[in-house]
Image (cartoon, rainbow, N blue to C red):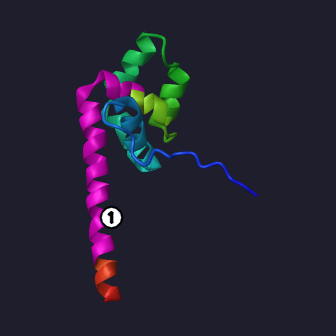
Amino acid sequence: MSTLQVPRKVNSPVGEKEQDLLFLISLLDREDKIEFVKEFREDFEQQIEEKKLSKTAYYKFLNGYAPSDERILQIAEMDEEAKKWVIERIREKAEKALRIIAALEGQEK
């Protein structure tokens, strides 16, 4: 039995910024996404004015529903501060993960 070998992309090349940002957004948990809505409320309100978001969806977000990754991506692409917020939040999570990994590896030795 023969199998077809298909080359895999291990890391996306630099330049696919939208996909890279979407990947970072996917690492946010529900609480982060809800905090994002509260932090960037004005951007969501602007989307309502532009008819890109319904008031009902917006009020659901304010009451604890997490927006989709794509919705957060839309905000992050139009607001540099929102993009920086996502990057910083993921940086904090990554640093914490690395500290935990280092501690666990230290226990194994």
Horizontal side, residue 9 vs residue 82: left or right: right
Q: Amino acid at mark 1?
A: Ala
Q: Quadrant of residue 84?
A: top left
* Foreground residue among 50 and 26: 26
Write the start and end of the magenta stretch as one range.
74-102
Q: Quadrant of residue 81?
A: top left
Residue 19: where, in percent of width, then height? Answer: 41, 34
The N terminus sits in image quarter: bottom right
The residue to which callout 1 is attached is 97
Residue 89 belongs to the span the image colors magenta = yes
Residue 100 belongs to the span the image colors magenta = yes
Q: Residue at x 31, y 40 (%)?
A: 86
Horizontal side, residue 55 vs residue 5: left or right: left
Horizontal side, residue 7 vs residue 98: left or right: right
Q: Residue at x 52, y 19 (%)?
A: 54
Q: Residue furthest right?
A: 1
Q: Is residue 45 above or below residue 2?
A: above
Q: Does residue 49 appear anywhere in the picture?
A: yes
Residue 67: where, in percent of width, then height? Answer: 49, 35
Q: Residue at x 39, y 20 (%)?
A: 45
Q: Is residue 24 above or below residue 109?
A: above
Q: Is residue 30 above or below residue 62?
A: below
* Foreground residue among 17 and 57: 17
